[in-house]
Amino acid sequence: MIAGEETLDIAATPAECFAFVLDLDRYREADHKIGRVSWLRERDGVVEVRYSTRFMGVPGPPVTHTVEVVPDERIDVRSKPDSLDGRLSAFHGWFTFDDNGDGTTRVTHREELHLKGPARLLEPVLGPWLEKDTPQELRRMKQLLEEG
């Protein structure tokens, strides 16, 4: 498994942070791994999204993820296990939004990627990159929210 994680205080409410992450068109400005969104739909109470990816600036395969939310508190994004990309890797990313009580929110973001089979050969390259990219992503989110 490779992972990246960061925690930052952001001058915005938990609701504002939560809404920002769920607005994929806007969140793409912070998360450069998200490419073109093909579709977003809710089926049987489960939100699914499919989009193209970029790793280290290189286009990657499209992925299908499920999104679970606890409004204004937590977002979990996971690979859809029965999709092709879910057989090559397993992704779990999450955000938590904790109200600091002073108009700021403590946001924690973690991304974990379990590469499977031959894809594991990419771990030595992708691991250090993801360790750096996730904190940069959260810093971009902070900047975008605070600068309006």
Image (cartoon, helix red, strand yellow):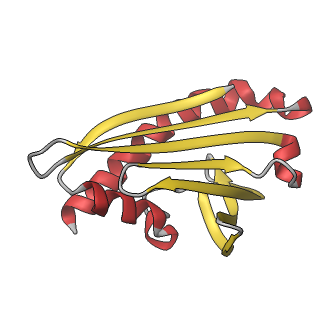
Residue 58 at what x, y percent from top left?
68, 53
Query: How many numbered callouts?
Result: 0
Residue drawn at x 78%, y 33% is 115
Q: Is 114 in front, or is 147?
A: 114
Q: Is 148 in front, or is 126?
A: 148
Q: Is residue 25 above or below residue 32?
A: below
Residue drawn at x 68%, y 35% is 113
- Spot the residue most to the left: 102
Q: Residue 47 sits in which quadrant? A: bottom right
Q: Is 68 in front, or is 60?
A: 68
Q: Residue 40 sits in which quadrant? A: bottom right
Residue 5 at what x, y percent from top left?
46, 32
Relative side of 102 to 127, left or right: left
Relative side of 122 to 42, left or right: right
Q: Which quadrant is home to the N terminus?
A: top right
Q: Is residue 29 above or below residue 91?
A: below
Residue 60 at what x, y percent from top left?
75, 55
Residue drawn at x 39%, y 34% is 6
